[in-house]
Amino acid sequence: MIRKFENIKATTKRKWIKKTSRWGVDDKRYHNKKWRNLREKVLRTNPLCVNCERRDIIKQADVVDHVKPITAGGEFYNENNLQGLCHACHNRKSAQQHKKEIKENSFKKEGKHLKELQ
Ligand SMILES: [Zn+2]
């Protein structure tokens, strides 16, 4: 279900922005035309969730995901670094990646976030 951003309460928005910026998905590049076109192209050529497909499940891809995350040095506009995932797989992947990054950066920059998450 997609809620219209402007219909969401301001406090919820602030929380959402805080959360997503911590997860590195507030990148401005997600809002430009170049990304939108690329995203459409990827979904057109790969309409199924690649992760589910590996497990012989046919599920529509909803999200275009960076195979190698941007935060890990992946290329943003490289089609070869993009794959279609369903929401469930994408959320799982993001959560795992986030945990991994916290571990890798632990105590230095991310120390505060670690406390928040515990
Ligand atoms: Zn999936």
Image (tube, rainbow, N blue to C red):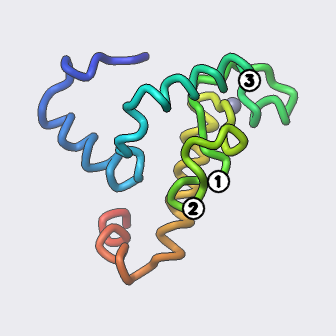
Relative image position of residue 75 (x, y in whole percent): 59, 51
Instruction: Answer whether labels 1 and 2 touch (C-beta < 8 Å).
Output: yes
**Which kind of residue does numbered mark 2 sit on?**
Gly
The crowd level at tag 3 (other Cα within 10 Å; few <14, some 14-19, many 20+) is some
Find residue 27 and report its image quarter.
Answer: top left
Residue named by callout 1: 68
Measured in 3D between alpha carbons, the distance from the residue under mark 3 to the one under mark 1, in whole angstroms, is 17 Å
At a point 28% along the width and 17% down the height, the residue shown is: 4
Tell me the crowding category of disc 1: few under 14, some 14 to 19, or many 20 or more residues within 10 angstroms, Cα based.
some
Q: Residue at x 53, y 23 (%)?
A: 37
Mark 3 sits on what residue? 46
Q: Where is mark 2, residue-wise?
A: 73
Q: Position of residue 43 (x, y in %)?
A: 65, 21
Quadrant holding the N terminus:
top left
| Secondary structure found at label 3 | loop
Tell me the SS state at disc 2. Answer: loop
- Residue 83, position in %: x, y? 68, 36
Q: State the separation of the CA atoms marked 1 and 2.
A: 7 Å
Tell me the distance, in whole angstroms, between the alpha carbons under discs 2 and 3.
23 Å
Foreground residue, 28 or 47? 28
Q: Is residue 54 left or right of residue 77?
A: right
Q: Amino acid at mark 3?
A: Asn
Left or right for 77, reference 16: right
Label 2 C-beta lies within 8 Å of the nearest ligand 1 atom: no
Q: Please state which amino acid type lies under the numbered disc 1.
A: Lys
Counting residues from the start of the chain, the first of labels 3 and 1 encountered is 3
Element class at badge 1: loop
- Quadrant position of the C terminus in the picture: bottom left
